[in-house]
Amino acid sequence: MNNFVIHDAIRNLYPNVVTIRGEESFDNEDNLIEVDMDEVMIEAERLSNIKPISIDDTIKDLKAQIEELKKLING
């Protein structure tokens, strides 16, 4: 698993973490924050499984929702 996903997982679980250096995480006053790496890896796995949604798919879904709303409004 790449470090970007692991860093995102740490920040999701520990919102007070502002800096990650190596394997250590720090708050805005440079205090060391202990992180549970087992939980981090679970979150990282969850993040890795999220499928990106394309803008085209989003527009298509929104257009379909608009059409449904128009039908409700117009009877």
Image (cartoon, rainbow, N blue to C red):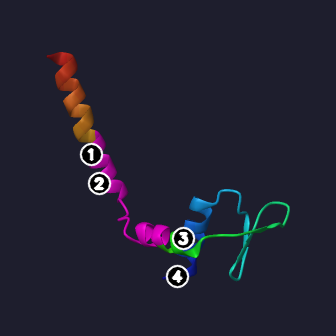
Which residue does the image show at 26% across and 40% down from the upper left?
63
Circle 4 residues within 10 Å: few <14, some 14–19, many ≥20: few
Residue furthest to the right? 29
Main SS, magenta residues: helix
Query: Is residue 60 shown above or below 34?
Result: above
Residue at the (65%, 56%) spot, across then down: 15
Query: In the drawing, what numbered circle is on residue 61?
Result: 1
> Is residue 54 on the magenta stretch?
yes
Mark 3 secondary-structure assignment: helix
- Whether pointer 1 and pointer 2 mark residues with C-beta atoms closer than 8 Å, the reply is yes
Q: Could you tell whether 35 is left or right of 50 in the image?
A: right
Mark 4: which secondary structure?
Answer: loop
Residue at image location 43% in from the left, 72% down from the top: 45
Give the amino acid type for the residue marked by disc 4 in the picture. Asn
Q: Earlier in the sequence, mark 2 or mark 4?
A: 4
Distance from the alpha carbon under mark 1 to that under mark 4? 32 Å
- Quadrant occupied by the C terminus: top left
Mark 3 neighbour density, 10 Å: few (under 14) some (14–19) many (20 or more):
many
Which residue is at 82% across, 66% downward? 31
Per the image, is 53 magenta?
A: yes
- Residue type at mark 2 is Asp
What number is the disc on residue 2?
4
Q: Which residues are magenta?
A: 42-62
Please state which of the two labelled residues, at mark 2 or mark 4, is closer to the viewer.
4
Please say if the residues under marks 3 and 2 sit with CB atoms less than 8 Å apart. no
Label 3 and label 2: CA atoms lie apart by 30 Å
Query: For mark 2, what is the residue?
Result: 57
